[in-house]
Every structure is written in structure tokens, then in C-alpha cells.
Amino acid sequence: MKQARVLNSMEMKRLLAVIEAGNHPVRNRVAIMLSYLAGLRVGEIAQLKVSDIYENCTSVREQILLPAGYTKGNDARLVFVSKKLKKELTTYQSSSVFPNKPTAPLLTTQKRTSFSPNTLCQLFGERYKRAGIDGASSHSGRRSFITKMAHNGISPKVIMTLAGHKHLGTTQRYIDVNDEMLKAAVEVI
């Protein structure tokens, strides 16, 4: 099976421009950023409640605890919130669409119901298509997150832990290798 495309910086800018010009830009942007900046799976994003992200609906948590029921492997895991993601989540919290109730779904549809993983997948796919990014899917943000860490020299064990993988081989399959990486590798010698 072909893997989801890893996004480069120009594609990400194009995607964010499409999101900004479309319906529900604040909600859609935070959904994409949870994938791209934290490596969350679309099913995990769909499960999130306001209290998972915000302390008393006011401040963004430093870490997000994903309960076992949210994750693919059915194992709870901690997701660390970067400064960039914290900024995105703070912007979302100050928006008029923020569901200011701890038990509410973090992201809601037009009908104010929680997204199913499938519906959120479709939303991601539509935005990638509008941005003209072939081969991108709801997994592209996650693959980009993992690949960017690997390209920046982060320990494979750290990446594996952040991704919530049990085996390093699984993490390695996510990492995209490109010509720039190969060229830089031979220049080390």
C-alpha cells in the first residue's frame, strides 16, 4: 500500500492558505496542526475532548494524555505540546467556535456533533485536494511530523515513543528519505 505523502514547507503553506480561505478555518487549521505538529492520528484527534487539551477550559496543557481508548494500540500515551502547537491551540481557544465546556468534543461538525474518524479523514482529504497536493491523506501530517524529527537528528527511540509505536521498525517505515538527505549523508564522510 502506498504511504501518505510527506508535506514539504511550500505544500504546508499552500494547505494553510486553502484552509484560511475556506469554511471553518480556525477549526480546520487546529485539526491539521494536531496531526502535523503533534503526530496525532485522525482517530485520536476525533476523540479529543476540551479537557484533554485545556486546563479548566483556559490554558493549554503542556502534555496531552491520550487515554487508551483514543489510541490505535489501545495504550495510553503522553503527547508533548510544542510552542508552535500551543500557539495554535491558544488561537483556537480564543475563537468564537471554541466549545467552552470541558466534556465537549474539541472539534465539532457544523451540526455541533463530534467528528467521526472517517468524517475527519474526509475533511483532511478535501483540504489536501483543494490545495493540489497529490498523494496526501489524513496520515500526511503524522508522517511529516515523524520524518521532520528524523531529518533533524532526533533519536529513533524518542521518535518511536512520541509516535506511540511499540516497534522501531514501524517508526522507520514512516520516515521519508529524499535526495537532500542522501546528499547531506555522503558529505559527512
Image (cartoon, rainbow, N blue to C red):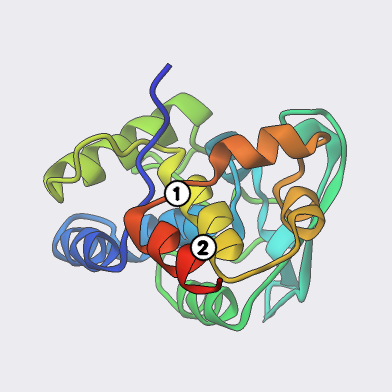
Image spot of residue 17 (x, y percent): 18, 67
The mark nearer the N terminus, 2 or 1, is 2
- Disc 1 target residue: 177
Q: Position of residue 144 (x, y in %)?
A: 46, 53
- Are there few (<14), some (14-19), or many (20+) residues within 10 Å of tag 1? few
What is the three-letter code of the residue carrying label 2? Answer: Lys
Which of the 4 image quarters holds residue 124?
Answer: top left
Instruction: Name the residue: 72% across, 55% down.
Output: 159
| Residue kind at label 1, given as amino acid type | Val
Gap between marks 2 and 1, in whole Å? 10 Å
Can you name the residue that lies furthest to the front here? 189
Q: Is residue 90 above or below residue 40?
A: below
Residue 71 appears anywhere in the view? no
Left or right: where 11 falls relative to 34: left
SS type, badge 1: loop
In contact (CB < 8 Å): disc 2 and disc 1: no
Q: Residue at x 46, y 79 (%)?
A: 91
Disc number for residue 148: 2
Vertical comparison of 84 with 109: above or below = below
Please, what secondary structure does the residue beneath circle 2 have?
Answer: helix
